[in-house]
């Protein structure tokens, strides 16, 4: 399998952690995509030009991190553990909020990266930051203890918090201490979190 991704991508990190968890990471060739370099971006077989994208050995292309994670979990028989059918709506809702947090944080990064400084919109940044803070408060309230295997939403939450650490110097930690403690526990229980640290890659 080939995974088109980048070291900083929080969505790519979800897939990498899931692949470690189900034991297939060493069967995956990671192809690093630099969205700022046209030649590199052209290698990504994703029609939306986003990462992550997983190319199966059959040549089939899977995209959207959630779809890829679900595929890996199902193929390796861990779907019920990570997405228990009795809690499917609640888990997927928490996963969607974690993804939304990543998306809003990413849009803040892009606003500064892709616009000339004089065109950067403080209103837009404020709007996205409000989503980030709203999602953090909601996820804090809906935080679940980590059992032996993390659930799909917990993988997403860890990656979302890791992205805030990476791009926003962990400012969230002073306001959301219980979430910071939760992330420390996740780190302890899921070695793949450290292995996929964007600072180390
Ligand atoms: N919903 C998608 C979001 C993926 C996404 O936004 N990836 C970012 C990098 S972290 C990207 O490729 N951005 C480039 C772009 O939007 O053009 C998923 O879960 O895979």
Image: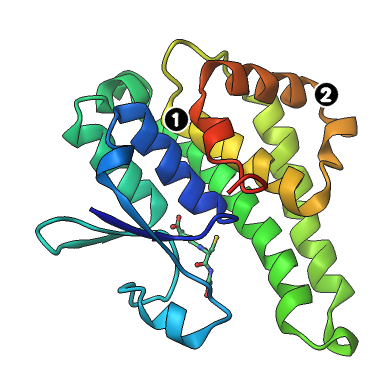
Residue in the foreground of this view, choosing between 176 and 21:
21
Query: In the image, is the residue at mark 1 within 8 Å of ligand 1 by its beta carbon?
Result: no
Q: Position of residue 10 (x, y in %)?
A: 56, 50
* Residue 94 visible here: no
Residue 53 is at least partly visible in this image: yes
Which circle marks residue 16 in the picture? none
Q: Quadrant of residue 4?
A: bottom left
Disc 1 secondary structure class: helix
Nearer the camera: disc 2 or disc 1: 2
Residue at image coords 43%, 25%: 151
Give the CA distance from mark 2 to mark 1.
Answer: 22 Å
Is 59 on the left-hand or right-hand side of 24? left
Whole-percent x, y for residue 71 in the image: 24, 43
- The residue identified by callout 2 is 177
Instruction: From this view, report whether residue 59 is shown above or below residue 144.
Output: below
Asked whether 6 or 154 is in front, the reply is: 6
Q: Residues at badges 2 and 1 in contact (C-beta under 8 Å)?
A: no
Report x, y in % for residue 97. Answer: 57, 43
Q: Label 1, on which residue?
A: 91
Question: Could you say which quadrant of the image residue 157 lies in?
Answer: top right
The one nearer the camera, 25 or 143, is: 25
The residue at 83%/33% (across/down) is 173
Residue 173 higher or lower than 52, as above or below: above
């Amino acid at each position: 399998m080939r995974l088109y991704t980048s070291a900083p991508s929080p969505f790519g990190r979800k897939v990498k952690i899931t692949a470690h968890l189900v034991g297939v990471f060493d069967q995956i060739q990671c192809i690093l995509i630099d969205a700022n370099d046209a030649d590199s971006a052209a290698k990504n077989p994703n029609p939306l030009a986003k990462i992550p994208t997983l190319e199966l050995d059959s040549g089939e292309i899977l995209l959207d991190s959630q779809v890829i994670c679900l595929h890996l979990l199902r193929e390796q028989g861990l779907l019920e553990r990570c997405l228990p059918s009795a809690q499917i709506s609640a888990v997927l809702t928490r996963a969607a909020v974690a993804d939304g947090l990543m998306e809003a944080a990413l849009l803040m990064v892009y606003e500064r990266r892709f616009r000339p400084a004089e065109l950067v919109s403080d209103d837009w940044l404020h709007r996205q930051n409000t989503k980030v803070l709203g999602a953090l408060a909601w996820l804090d309230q809906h935080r679940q203890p980590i059992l032996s295997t993390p659930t799909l939403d917990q993988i997403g939450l860890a990656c979302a918090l890791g992205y805030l650490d990476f791009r926003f110097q962990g400012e969230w930690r002073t306001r959301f201490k219980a979430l910071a403690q939760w992330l420390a526990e996740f780190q302890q229980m899921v070695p793949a979190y450290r292995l996929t640290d964007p600072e180390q890659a």
